Image (spheres, rainbow, N blue to C red):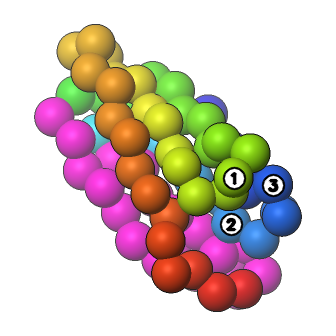
Amino acid sequence: MPCITPDGKFAVSGSYKTLKLWDLVTGKELTAFIGEAKMLSCAIAPDGVTVVAGDGSGRVHFLRLEGLRG
């Protein structure tokens, strides 16, 4: 379920209740978002900033990747 920003510099991955943001140049985890149910899907909008993720409870999460440098 990983998704990659349009510029190819960052990726979002999901495991169980967590979404993690990765820097693909350094391989380092930059941050994590913890939800209340298993993350099932994610997508990054063409703007490279908006992340939409769906979890097993039916919730949809909207996250913003602001202030990233790469």
Q: Which residue is mark 3?
A: 6
Q: Amino acid at mark 3?
A: Pro
User: How far apart are the two marked residues, 3 and 1, measured between alpha carbons?
Assistant: 8 Å
Is residue 55 in view from this perspective?
Answer: yes
Q: Which residue is mark 1?
A: 47
Q: Residue furthest right?
A: 7
User: How far apart are the two marked residues, 2 and 3, measured between alpha carbons?
Assistant: 9 Å
Q: Nearer the viewer, mark 2 or mark 3?
A: 3
Q: Is residue 11 magenta?
A: no
Q: Which residues are magenta?
A: 18-36
Above or below, 65 against 44 in this view is below
Give me the residue at 38% from left, 31% from top: 39
Q: Amino acid at mark 1?
A: Asp
Q: Nearer the viewer, mark 1 or mark 2?
A: 1
- Tell me which numbered mark, 1 or 2, is placed earlier along the sequence: 2
Q: Residue furthest top?
A: 58
Left or right of 34 on screen, residue 21? right
Give me the residue at 65% from left, 75% from top: 23
Mark 2 Cα within 10 Å, few/some/many (few <14, many 20+)? many
Give me the residue at 22% from left, 41% from top: 35
Q: Is residue 24 magenta?
A: yes
Q: Which residue is mark 2?
A: 10
Circle 3 sits in a helix, a strand or a loop, which is it?
A: loop
Residue 17 screen position, x and y as percent: 28, 39
Residue 7 screen position, x and y as percent: 83, 64
Instruction: Look at the magenta stretch and give its main secondary structure.
Output: strand
Is residue 16 in view from this perspective?
Answer: no
Left or right of 42 on screen, residue 7? right
Circle 2 sits in a helix, a strand or a loop, which is it?
A: strand
- Tell me which numbered mark, 3 or 1, is placed earlier along the sequence: 3
Give me the residue at 40% from left, 71% from top: 31
